Amino acid sequence: MTLPRLLVLSLGGTITMTPAAGGGIAPTLGAAELVAAVPGLDEVAQIEARSPFRLASSSLTLENIVAVAGDIRAAFAEDFDGAVVIQGTDTIEETAFILDLLVRDARPVVVVGAMRGPQQAGADGPANLLAAAIAAASEAARGLGTLVVLNDEIHAARFVRKAHTALTSAFVSENAGPLGLVAEGRARLFTRVAPLALPSLPLPEGELPPVALLKMTMGDDGRLLRAVPGLGCAGLVIEGMGAGHVPAAVAEIVGEVAAAIPVVLASRTLAGPAFERTYGYPGSEIDLIGRSVLPAGLLGGPKARLLLTFALAAGWERPAIAAALAAYA
Ligand code: DAS
């Protein structure tokens, strides 16, 4: 039997980290070494291993992930059956969301990492990589967009979030739960996500438009908010309190900023939708939407920022951006 062909790209992260001269651990291992260390992986897929980056995931850039999306698109043009992207867990949800936007293909793309380094007791990297490859090689995972696999759970890019700094069960999908799990060497899907109802996006070239993300907190006086357009930002995402609220004193500033650049309103609560038609006081979602702010649906701040970034890079105007956000509501 011919095994499925997988492209495995390693970008760095704890899963690749070994002791550094100055203390702590730092990225060193590449994809080939990681693949070689997983018992049974050679029975799952034929793997082409590449290591485009060896970075902590906090240092990956959007442009780095656009390049990864380009590599995966090229591999899919060459008849690979799936792709696995190995990286640090700190920004896995952002990488997965970008790949979900930019690689529109039924073949699975799975992003994976580890919460413990390869030399720590109970290292979870090998098990996570095996589960990711099983998912990426499976028929069952086709048509679900980009997935994140850790702790044997399969999450959809649009829902997944890192919710703990230490546990191997750090990844959650609060709005939906995981789509499935990998058990006994098989990807089992309990539920499926609908295909993204968004126009396809071209692979952007060059620098992406800068989009700011600001979290509202009690007593915020809006001074950072007011500065955003003058800093050269092409868009802004506000993580509002609760269902998407700001202090009354800040509402007018939000309106001034939204007159200059697109402003998206998400919730800092991390689950549930940004509201659109419930609260009517100054600084509420109804007030802010009346000041041209666009609600983020179920997207949290970081993912709303990515959608706005790639929409602006594609030249989308406000109605198209609003429709794209509504696809996540
Ligand atoms: N937190 C680390 C990890 O889980 C570091 C990183 O994200 O690169 O991989």
Image: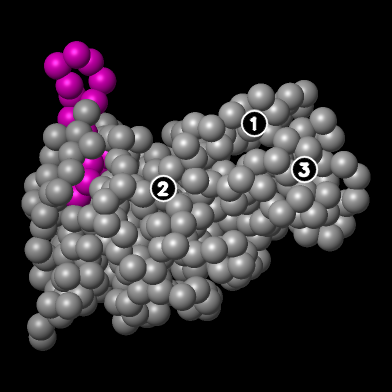
Residue 241 in view in this figure: no
Q: Where is residue 290 in the image (x, y as percent from the top left)?
A: 80, 54
Quadrant location, the C terminus: bottom right
Q: Where is residue 168 in the image (x, y as percent from the top left)?
A: 42, 43
Residue behind mark 2: 209
| Label 3 vs 2, first from the N-terminus | 2
Q: Along the horizontal axis of the image, is 208 left or right of 222?
A: left
Tag 2: Cα neighbours inside 10 Å, few (<14), some, or many (≥20)? some
Q: Residue at x 12, y 45 (%)?
A: 30
Instruction: Identify the image quadrant of residue 53.
Output: top left
Three-letter amino acid code at disc 1?
Arg
Q: Along the horizontal axis of the image, is 269 left or right of 308?
A: right
Q: Which mark is residue 262?
A: none
Q: Which mark is residue 226?
A: 1
Image height of 135 relative to 17, above or below: below
Tag 1: Cα neighbours inside 10 Å, few (<14), some, or many (≥20)? some
Residue behind mark 3: 245
Q: Which residue is drawn at 58% across and 47% down?
A: 261
Q: Could you say which is closer to the camera, residue 141 or residue 90?
A: 90
* Residue farthest along the bottom direction in this orientation: 1
- Start-end of magenta stretch: 10-25
Three-letter amino acid code at disc 2?
Pro
